[in-house]
Amino acid sequence: MKKPRDVEEFVENGLDKISVFGEFVGRSLGSMGRSMQKVVIGIGILLIFGLAAFIWALGKGMFRKK
C-alpha cells in the first residue's frame, strides 16, 4: 500500500507536467496571430468532439458488420 506522501508526490509531479505542457501550448499560441489562434483552438475542439462521437458510435455498435 502506498504511503500518503507517495500519492501526494505522484499528484504533484503530474500537476507539474500538466503545467509545463500548458506553458508550452500558451507560448506556441502566443507566437501566432489572433486569427490563427482561433483556427488552432477550433480544430482542437472539433478533433475532441469527433473523437468522442467516434468512441460513442463504437460503444453503440454502429460499426458492426451484419
Image: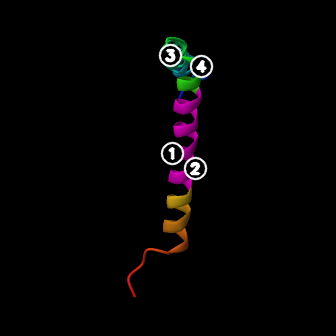
**Residue at 53%, 53% in the rendered image:** 50
Q: Which mark is residue 34?
A: 4
Tell me, yes or no, if residue 1 can be seen here.
no
Type of secondary structure dominating the magenta stretch: helix
Q: Are marks 1 and 2 in contact (CB under 8 Å)?
A: yes
Residue 66, x across and y down, in percent = 40, 88
- Name the secondary structure under disc 3: loop
The residue labelled by disc 3 is 32
Q: Amino acid at mark 2?
A: Phe
The residue labelled by disc 2 is 49
**Residue at 48%, 16% in the rendered image:** 28
Q: Is residue 9 above or below residue 61?
A: above
Nearest to viewer (mark 4 / mark 2): 4
Residue 1, x across and y down, in percent = 53, 32
Magenta residues, start to end? 38-52
Left or right: 57 as drawn, with respect to 64:
right
Q: Are marks 3 and 4 in contact (CB under 8 Å)?
A: no
**Quarter assignment of residue 30:** top right
- Specify which label sits upstream in the sequence, 3 or 2: 3
The residue labelled by disc 1 is 47
Task: Find the distance from the CA under tag 3 to the CA under tag 4.
Answer: 7 Å
Nearest to viewer (mark 1 / mark 3): 3
Q: Are marks 3 and 2 in contact (CB under 8 Å)?
A: no
**Residue at 59%, 19% in the rendered image:** 34
Residue 10, x across and y down, in percent = 52, 22
- Specify which label sits upstream in the sequence, 1 or 4: 4
Q: Is residue 36 above or below residue 43?
A: above
In this picture the colour scheme is rainbow
Q: Amino acid at mark 1?
A: Leu
Q: Amino acid at mark 4?
A: Arg
